[in-house]
Amino acid sequence: MVKKFYSSVEMIQQLVAFDTTSSKTNMHLIDFIQRYLSLHGVESTLIPDPTANKSNLFATIGPEETPGVVLSGHTDVVPVDGQSWETEPFDVIEKNGRLYGRGTSDMKSFIAITLSLVPYFLAQSLKIPIHLAFSYDEEIGCLGAPRMIAQFGKAQVMPLACFVGEPTNMKVVNAHKGVHGFRTTVYGLEQHSSATHKGVNAVQYASRLITYLSDLSNEISNTMSDSQSEFEPPYTTIHVGTIQGGTAQNIIPKECTFSWEYRLMPEEDPEEIYNKFKMFVDTDILPSMRKNFANASVDTIQRTIVPGLRAEKNSFAEELALNIAKDNSTGVVSFGTEAGQFQSAGVPTIICGPGSIEQAHKPNEFIELKQVSECEGFLRKLSEFCCYDKMYDDN
Ligand SMILES: [Zn+2]
């Protein structure tokens, strides 16, 4: 049963109750939002994934054909498996001025507050519309939003600005690092372990590649650290997360796979590290492997591309957000978000949302009720700004 009116807290309880862990469907939650919006006469468009098991939702409040301000959030959450929770993670509990539950900080509260304010937005005479853009699969590499963003300038008008409501304690954030994730598999030649001169040891060649990445990472931190930057740490980082390979101690392993990533300062060339790695594979590793086995190979596939968010000083999004927040400074964050994807499509974008990333992805995730009301105030103010043709020339 979908009600017509919810307080922000009631709506947070509703949304958290849908277990939208990225591995599962989000359609129950999307269906709920769609029915809620339609009770208010707001039509929404679903942009599903190829399986139709998950979907983005896009809706416009206010004049349809006018460029507006996007409020962006992801509907999926990270798993609770293996975490020790003191409360039931999908049942929001209020305790000591906080709401506990999976997704309360990352980032269902932002979506819930936005939805609970839909009647308020509708009561304003918006000249500039508010677009709702809710995605799927953000937590597993920002896979959903690009399908929705691809509609901008085609099925949807190109928006003026985008606010991504990831948790920043309502601080206006204008930059984050990009994330590029890869999986590399080394294929060697299996032999009895006594015949090292005949085999090609995939685990040992993979180790050389990993050592190369570690050395490159150290070189970058030693030579490319930007002391002016607010990023922590103020340089691009490289990291190897998993490795699997080999069968037994007495068999020369024929296969080894490892996953790795770099988190790139937003101004840097996204290809450079990959190209160096590829060069090392081609000029050093493969010639050596192929002395014993002509079919030896190293295959690398890119699994994640999350573009960084570049600071755009005085962009429309940044000025609008700072005006609403009555703040004059911006921050940066080190985690990846969909913001860089919106920016890459030509939409000025900032991040500003309730709650703290400190609580994200952890057991006993919570949001402070104070953050909920601060976000409510911010979004009310935004809708008031959207009633003027020129949004802030008197401020
Ligand atoms: Zn998030």
Image: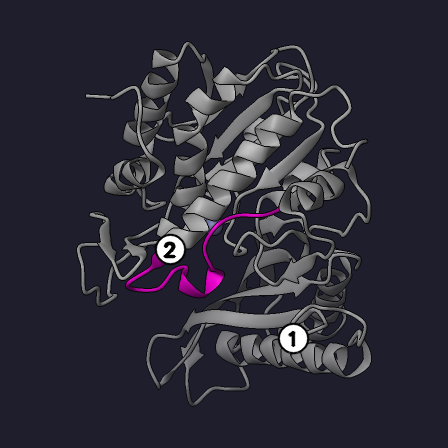
Quadrant of the drawing holding the C terminus: top right
Q: Is mark 1 within 8 Å of ligand 1?
A: no
Residue 115 in picture, x, y percent from top left: 41, 29
Residue 343 in picture, x, y percent from top left: 71, 40
Q: Is mark 2 within 8 Å of ligand 1?
A: no
For label 2, count other residues whose C-alpha is less than 10 Å away and answer few (under 14), some (14-19) or many (20+). Answer: many
Residue 367, numbered circle: 2
Three-letter residue code for mark 1: Leu
Residue 245 or residue 1, whichever sits in front: 1
Magenta span contains residue 387? no
Tell me how far mark 1 sits from mark 2, CA to CA: 38 Å
Residue stretch rendered in magenta on the structure: 351-366
Three-letter residue code for mark 2: Ile
The reply, left or right, for residue 391 in relation to residue 145 is: right
Looking at the image, which residue is at 62% across and 56% down?
180
Looking at the image, which residue is at 58% across and 64% down?
261
Count of numbered labels shown in the rendering: 2
Residue 199, numbered circle: none
Mark nearer the viewer, 1 or 2: 2
